[in-house]
């Protein structure tokens, strides 16, 4: 055949493929979500999330030191609160010295360079598991919830959190949090808003990790989290969060919403975070355990797709092990060149 154009020429060797690769993953792309509990005893395994632990305060700080050594930029903290401390008003959220504030303080003291992203939502603290306060008719109330969220964000900033990340999907919370932070001279603390957070089936393992699932029927959060069918609504949420002062907007989950990431990339100038959630992680781990998928290849492909779609940063449970592998590779290379 006389072909002038042969796209395969650029694929012939690994070196050529590396030169022409359009999307690359870097260590700075990743954010590690971390779980921890305040009870005694050891770090605990989470059944549906192999390799991920519900840390103790001590193992959490140790883990952050290791992550920082491997080059991790940021961690996102999620506390698993003792059920005895939960109530319908989430009052433990605003209790000084609760496990979250202690964790933020200890991590910032141990590894000041590591950015700490604090979750701003009430689900770890409510006995009903919802992200907000309930009206007596059972509806999740918006405005009273936002008042508590703003106070929670300020207390997290006081403890040393670098980035406040509202994951609750209440209306107007970004503006309220921005104003509350600014009025306490926390103008330098950033807001990473979970702007397009969908009512997804893929949060199951996370709720097990936080023990925030009440009973066996998955909690219905459809009155505040978005309908998976909607794309324009995601653009509206991003627009509002931007107007209200968000510094980074988020899409969550990531892998099943690549079109949303791409559409938002084309409409905002803000950085976009994508959250590869617990169910996405569990799927890859489970299929690999059954021998049905190649673990490393499926993992890397899933992350690359999220970056290709337009994410500036990725929250993923694979973050730590990706960086650990790269750190080992770099060490190995150093030995080879010596
Ligand atoms: C709740 C919250 C959830 C996740 C992060 N924050 C679950 C939910 O909305 O029920 C899910 C993250 C994951 O599945 O990895 N504020």
Image (spheres, rainbow, N blue to C red):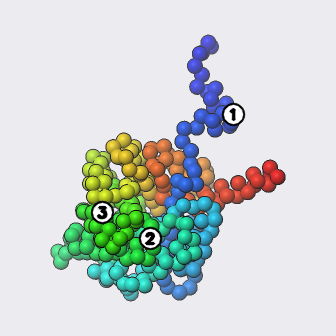
- Mark yes or no: residue 6 visible: yes
Give me the residue at 53% from left, 47% from top. Answer: 304
In this view, the residue in front, 118 or 293, is 118
Q: From what the image shows, is residue 4 above or below residue 204? A: above
Task: Say whether marks 3 and 2 touch (CB < 8 Å).
Answer: no
In this view, the residue in front, 330 or 1, is 330
Distance between the Cα atoms at labels 3 and 2? 16 Å
Q: From what the image shows, is residue 313 above or below residue 14? A: below
In this rendering, position of residue 135 left or right of residue 265 = left
Where does label 2 land, which residue? 161
Which residue occupies the extreme front position in the image? 185
Where does label 3 land, which residue? 174
Q: Quadrant of residue 55?
A: bottom right
Q: Nearer the viewer, mark 1 or mark 2?
A: 2
Where does label 1 land, which residue? 13
Give me the residue at 44% from left, 77% from top. Answer: 159
Give me the residue at 45% from left, 73% from top. Answer: 160
The residue at label 1 has a CB less than 8 Å from ligand 1: no
Which residue occupies the extreme right position in the image? 338
SS label for mark 3:
helix
In this rendering, position of residue 309 left or right of residue 139 = right
Residue 290 place in picture, x, y as percent: 58, 57
Q: Residues within 10 Å of mark 3 (few under 14, many from 20)?
A: many
Residue 91 place in picture, x, y as percent: 32, 82
Give me the residue at 53% from left, 74% from top. Answer: 107
Distance between the Cα atoms at labels 1 and 2? 46 Å
């Amino acid at each position: 055949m006389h072909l002038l154009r042969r796209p395969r020429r650029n694929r012939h060797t690994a070196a050529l493929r590396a030169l022409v690769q359009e999307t690359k993953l870097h260590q700075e792309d990743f954010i590690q979500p971390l779980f921890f509990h305040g009870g005694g005893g050891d770090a605990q395994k989470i059944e549906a999330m192999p390799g991920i632990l519900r840390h103790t305060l001590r193992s959490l700080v140790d883990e952050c030191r290791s992550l920082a050594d491997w080059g991790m930029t940021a961690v996102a903290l999620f506390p698993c609160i003792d059920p005895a401390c939960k109530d319908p008003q989430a009052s433990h959220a605003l209790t000084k010295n609760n496990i979250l504030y202690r964790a933020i303080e200890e991590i910032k003291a141990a590894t000041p360079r590591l950015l700490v992203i604090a979750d701003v939502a009430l689900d770890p603290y409510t006995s009903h598991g919802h992200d907000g306060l309930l009206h007596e008719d059972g509806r999740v109330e918006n405005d009273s919830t936002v008042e508590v969220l703003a106070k929670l964000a300020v207390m997290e900033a006081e403890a040393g959190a670098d980035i406040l990340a509202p994951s609750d999907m209440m209306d107007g919370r970004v503006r309220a949090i921005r104003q509350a932070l600014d009025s306490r001279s926390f103008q330098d603390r950033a807001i990473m808003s979970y702007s397009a957070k969908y009512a997804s089936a893929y949060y199951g393992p996370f709720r097990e990790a936080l023990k925030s699932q009440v009973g066996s029927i998955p909690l219905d959060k459809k009155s505040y989290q978005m309908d998976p069918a909607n794309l324009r609504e995601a653009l509206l949420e991003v627009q509002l969060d931007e107007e209200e002062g968000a510094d980074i907007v988020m899409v969550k989950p990531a892998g099943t919403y690549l079109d949303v990431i791409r559409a938002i990339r084309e409409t905002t100038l803000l950085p976009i975070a994508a959250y590869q959630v617990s169910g996405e992680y569990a799927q890859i781990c489970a299929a690999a355990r059954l021998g049905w998928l190649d673990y490393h290849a499926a993992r890397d492909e899933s992350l690359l797709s999220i970056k290709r779609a337009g994410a500036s940063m990725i929250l993923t449970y694979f973050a730590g092990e990706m960086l650990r592998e790269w750190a080992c590779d770099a060490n190995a290379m150093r030995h080879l060149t010596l």
